[in-house]
Amino acid sequence: MGESMKSVVVCGSKRYAKEIKKFCDDLAKLGVLVFEPSISEPIPEDAFIHSTYVTAKLFKGLTLEHFDWIRKAEVCFVYNTGDYVGISVTMEMAYAAALGKPVFALSPKTGDPCRDALIDKVVKTPKQLAALL
């Protein structure tokens, strides 16, 4: 029987888009299927696209897309450099924990002790993360 595919969903703030992209690329080079956040071309929170209805559907779609990736991945990895986690990542961490998925993070701190408690393991590098899968 062959080896199963290793997979990770990465969650993080768009303020760290460049660093997250590099982390994801390095992880993919190690043979891991990476579900990356859609932050390479971030949409501002106050964006208005065509109508209020379309804007709401767009943001809901982005959120549900990431939830789908969390369901598919073996592990949820939180890129929380500077001990920062925003509202979207908070939802993603909670969703992963509710599904029984391990939550790994770059740092043990997120700015909130309840979120911190959801972190199962601190992982500093893509190589270290790939080895745990």
Image: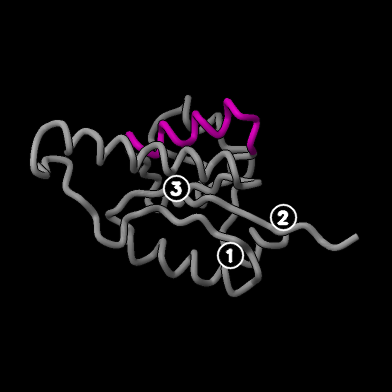
* Image coords of residue 9 (percent x, y): 53, 50
Which residue is the site of mark 2?
Answer: 133
* Mark toward the start of the polypeptide (2 vs 3): 3
As measured in the structure, the alpha-carbon distance from the residue carrying label 2 to the one carrying label 1 is: 11 Å
* Image coords of residue 127 (percent x, y): 64, 67
From which residue to which does the magenta span run? Answer: 87-101
Which residue is the site of mark 1?
Answer: 126
Q: Which residue occupies the foreground of this view, 7 or 57?
A: 57
* Image coords of residue 49 (percent x, y): 11, 44
Which residue is the site of mark 3?
Answer: 11
As measured in the structure, the alpha-carbon distance from the residue carrying label 1 to the one carrying label 3 is: 14 Å
* Picture residue at 48% right of the left edge, 25% below the top: 114
The disc labelled 2 sits on which kind of residue?
Leu
Instruction: Locate residue 6 relative to residue 105 in the image: left or right.
Output: right
Q: Could you tell me what secondary structure mostly forms the magenta stretch?
A: helix
Instruction: Locate residue 19 relative to residue 108 in the image: left or right.
Output: left
Quarter of the figure that contains the N terminus: bottom right
Q: Crowding near pointer 2: few (<14 within 10 Å), some, many (20+)?
A: few
